[in-house]
Image (spheres, grey):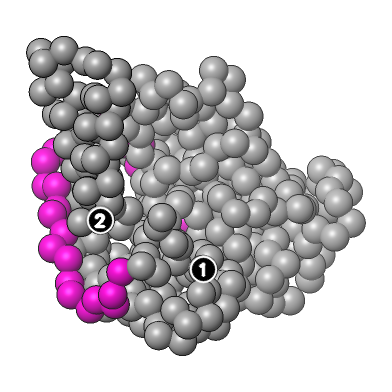
Amino acid sequence: MRKEKFWISSAFEIYKLSHLSLIKAPVLLLLAILLIFNLACSVNLDLVSLNEPASTAEKPVLIDDSPCPGKITRVRFQLLEALLKPEIAAALKESAVPSKAEADLKFFFAGQFPVTTLEELKAEIQKKFSVDFLRQLKRGTFLLTWEKEDAQSPEKATSPSQESIIPKGNFYDDDEAYGFPQTSFFTPEGRKHWITLFNPNPEQPPALKLQLNIHPSAYPSGKEPRIDQQRPVIIEFSRIIDFPEKGFQVIGLLASGDTAYFCCFQPDLICQDANLSPFRVRLIRKVDPIYPEEARRRNLTGTVKLEARTNLDGYISDIRLLEAPDPILAEAAIEAVRSWVYKLPEFEGKKYPVNLTFTVTFKKIR
């Protein structure tokens, strides 16, 4: 109220000093009122004001269920493991593409198999590489998405570099879904390796020319940074691949102990029109953080960054603190985020948990 009186008083002082006509006076007064209204209504949902009393009230969240037009490219994925004969493994290692000394895997094969079923593919691999035993480690689906409005976005670079591309889409399997199209597997030594498939040109819908990256993790399982926060240092395999319209694209990798891995990709939907709404995670309940009294007395401000995963019911779990100016503010942000609920993405009739990042800013509003 004091701010409103100040702005109205200032408006009339300007009127007196400028000797404005009676016709201009209402216009000036209207502008002053609009300015006051704008200041009063400015709200940042991620902002907690030190000047306002603490509040625990839930804020209703409106869900936009309108269709989200876009394109999808769907690629089925199979990861096969084989124990090669020593002589075959030795020959492949000699011809394998050199990689960095720190890398565990060596690339030895990239090719297409014009077969339609997984059993036919297994038979072809066993025949070509004299494999006696071939087992399936993982299967899932890479779903790459592209929104039509993205192509018209002024923020898009005309020639985006690979480092600036953030993958859009998800990898879906029976166990997990990530915030980007990426899956992983473990080599015999217990080291985790990531497989990422994404659209190399975000200005165009994903088609048959896709980027494949494979790299080892330097972090313990579950502690890896998000792909948009830190890029891997070691790349064991990186290539833009022309996937076949029919059949399988296979990438062969050698590990220690004569063990081979075959990454098998089978596109079954290419650049198809789709409604992307079911694939999105949406907030349906939010509780504002409470500014602690001790933090108020100490005049603490700053930004808290969190990373968390949802349960299958949409509630937050496994919260990980990434950054905080003070433990008191971190605790307040975590307590609020625990109460948030999300509508989970759905794929082929099944809901999937997601990984999320949160930023809560405690700041003085002057």
Q: Residue furthest bottom?
A: 294
The structure residue drawn at horizontal position 24% and vertical position 76%, both measured from the top left corner, is 55
Structural crowding at the residue carrying mark 2, measured as other residues with C-alpha within 10 Å and reported as few (<14), some (14–19) or many (≥20): few
In the drawing, does residue 6 fall left or right of residue 112?
left
Q: Quadrant of the C terminus?
A: bottom left
Q: Which residue does the image show at 25% across and 25% down from the upper left?
A: 16
Q: Position of residue 42 (x, y in %)?
A: 27, 48
Most foreground residue, 53 or 93: 53
Figure label count: 2
Q: Is residue 127 left or right of residue 273?
A: right
Location of mark 2 (residue): 2
**SS assignment at label 2:** helix
Q: Is residue 66 magenta?
A: yes
What is the quadrant of the N terminus in the image? Answer: bottom left
Residue 145 or residue 152, whichever sits in front = 152
Tell me the tag on residue 301: 1
